[in-house]
Amino acid sequence: MDRSEELPKTPRPPRNGLLGLVERWLPFWEPQLVVACAIALQLSLSEDVTIGPSWLFPALEGALLVGLVLASPHPSVRHSRLRRHVAIGMIGLVSAANMVSLVRLCHHLLVGGKENGHALILSGIVLWCTNVLLFALWYWEVDRGGPVARACDEGGFPDFMFVQMDKTQFAPPGWRPQLVDYLYLSFTNATAFSPTDTMPLTPIAKWLMTGQSVASLVTVALVVSRAVNILS
């Protein structure tokens, strides 16, 4: 038997320097980076599926994001409910703009001819990718009252059951889902149109996953059918 197994394991000390700084700040910057990616994707949409110029809504959303980024370094703001409400409001605004674009895309793909067909197909792919990013943020903010409540164990019952929560032997002690876990959940739900390894437990989680599956299914079905029509 290896004698190293008999030694008690000591917790890893906090890291210093650049790596320690990244570990402390990453949980707060990750969601903002995802929102920035979603806004950047909106800039590539065709004006046929946007309200007004294609830059209008991304500019408004970008202004809100910049304000949130500037306020985040302050600890009193970072852990406040107001910041979470502002963050949820911003995600909601981007999601609303994405849903409007999806409705307009459906209209053009169903009643339009082959005019701007390639641009509309590209817009459908962009909307699908944006859908994955936005729902990952919704799952991140909803589950157990949000990231701060989860970190402080104040969120009550979980909204999602991850494998590591049931099979604790496959996760370190005190494991909590990170943003990458919600991104994976969102991606698999958007591709399989159903839960895979993570189960929704609460009504709001089930409604969110249902809404994402419907939006993803409609987008994929219309884009594929229009692509076949154009290529034929």
Image (cartoon, grey):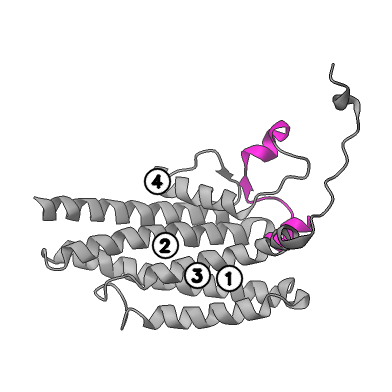
Near mark 1 (Cα within 10 A), the count class, few <14, some 14-19 or many ≥20, is some
Q: Which residue is mark 1?
A: 88
Q: Residue 167 colored magenta?
A: yes
Q: Residue furthest front?
A: 17
Amino acid type, mark 4: Thr
Q: CA distance from mark 1 to mark 2?
A: 16 Å
Q: Please report the residue visible at 68 percent of the width from the left and 56 percent of the height from the top.
A: 144
Q: CA distance from mark 4 to mark 1?
A: 25 Å
What secondary structure is found at the residue carrying circle 2?
Answer: helix
Q: Please report the residue visible at 20 percent of the width from the left and 67 percent of the height from the top.
A: 108
Q: Which residue is mark 3?
A: 36
Q: Which residue is mark 4?
A: 191
Q: Which residue is mark 2?
A: 130
Amino acid type, mark 3: Ala
Q: In the rendered structure, which segment of residues is drawn in magenta?
A: 146-170
Which comes sooner in the sequence, label 1 or label 2? 1
What secondary structure is found at the residue carrying circle 4?
Answer: helix
Would you say residue 131 is visible in this rendering?
yes
What secondary structure is found at the residue carrying circle 3?
Answer: helix
Q: CA distance from mark 3 to mark 4?
A: 23 Å
Which comes sooner in the sequence, label 3 or label 1? 3
